[in-house]
Structure formats: structure tokens, C-alpha cells
Amino acid sequence: MDSRAPKKILTPNEAFERAKKYCAFQERSHSEVRYKLLDYGLRGKDLEEVMAKLIEEGFLNEERFAAAFAGGKFRMKQWGKQKIKQELKRKGVSDYLIQKAMNEVKRDDYDATLKKLLEKKAATLKDRNIFTKKQKLSSYLIRKGYEPEEVYKQVSQYYRLKE
């Protein structure tokens, strides 16, 4: 038996006020806000009206969200473009806005971050076998979302300089 009290269903005005605070705290995607409004008990026309009002008043902007998300994940978590694109797609952002958001990540910064991650991870690898080191390093960088062909090129170049 569930001892929790049932959730209170909010009126459209109450939901709008809560959603404003939710959106003001940090940038949100349309799908995140839609799920939150569903959680508040809004459905159909009421849900769409609240969404439209949030967009109209500037609390919800998918382009701004995509740019903030891409820039933040790159700077803070040092994710590669592939992982950022995948997460934006998962959040329901359009391909056009994803491409536009990717322009927030400057090529020079991207290459420098990849190189920094490569060197930092390479310093932690204890294997004697060079092929195992290359494999582990490449796998790590690809999981971080960097493009495989760029990773292989950088890893090869790094170990060529080490010889």
C-alpha cells in the first residue's frame, strides 16, 4: 500500500506560476516543461495554453536552451560534440537547433579540450603494452563523445611524439 498522499492537481494559473519558476531557475527544453506540466495535472488545451504563454513571455526558448546546454556540457563536463548532439536529440530538440547549438563550441577550444583530456588520461594508464594503452585511451575519448576518426588521429599523433 502506498502511504504517500495523491498529488494535488494544479489549476492552469498555478501551474503557470510554478512553471515560470522552473524555467527561470535554468534553461529548459520544451519536452522537460511539457512533462513537468503533465506532472502538475495539466492536459490538452490547458497544457498547450500554458506552454504558449511561457514561450510568449520568454521563459521558454528552445534555441536558447540548446545553446546553453551545448556550451555548458562542453565547458563543464568536457563532452564531445557527438554526445552533446545525442543528448539534445533525446530531449526533443530539432536538428536545426542542434546544429546551431554546435556552433557555440569553437573548434580551437574543442581541439584543445580533446588534447588536454587525452594527455590527462594517458598519464593514468599503467599498461606496458602500447596497443592496450591506445585502445583504452581511444575508448575513453569516444565515450566522452568525441568523433572516432579525430580520436584515432590524435592518439596516434600523441604516441608518435612519445617515441
Image (cartoon, rainbow, N blue to C red):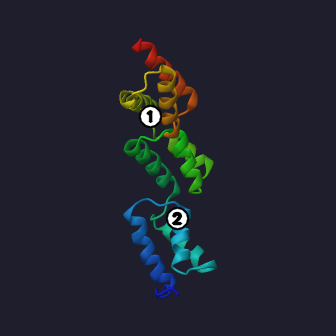
In three-dimensional space, the C-alpha distance between marks 1 and 2, rounded to whole angstroms, equals 27 Å
Residue shown at the point (53%, 36%) measured from the top left: 142
As helix, strand or loop, the secondary structure at mark 2 comes to helix
Q: Position of residue 25 (x, y in %)?
A: 37, 64
Number of labels in the image equals 2
- In the image, residue 52 above or below residue 145: below
Residue shown at the point (51%, 65%) measured from the top left: 55
* Residue that numbered label 1 is attached to: 106
Q: In the image shown, does 81 or 159 lie closer to the viewer?
A: 159
Residue reaching furthest top?
A: 163
Mark 2 belongs to which amino acid? Glu
- The answer to which quarter of the image holds residue 30 is bottom right
Residue reaching furthest front?
A: 128
* Mark 2 Cα-neighbour bin, 10 Å: few <14, some 14–19, many ≥20: some
* Mark 1 Cα-neighbour bin, 10 Å: few <14, some 14–19, many ≥20: few
- In the rendered image, is residue 58 in sight? yes
* Residue that numbered label 2 is attached to: 32
Q: In the image shown, does 154 or 63 lie closer to the viewer?
A: 154
Q: Position of residue 76 (x, y in %)?
A: 37, 45
Tell me: 147 left or right of 23: right
**Comparing marks 1 and 2, which lies closer to the viewer?**
2
Mark 1 belongs to which amino acid? Lys
Q: Position of residue 33 (x, y in %)?
A: 51, 67
- In the rendered image, is residue 93 in sight? no
As helix, strand or loop, the secondary structure at mark 1 comes to loop
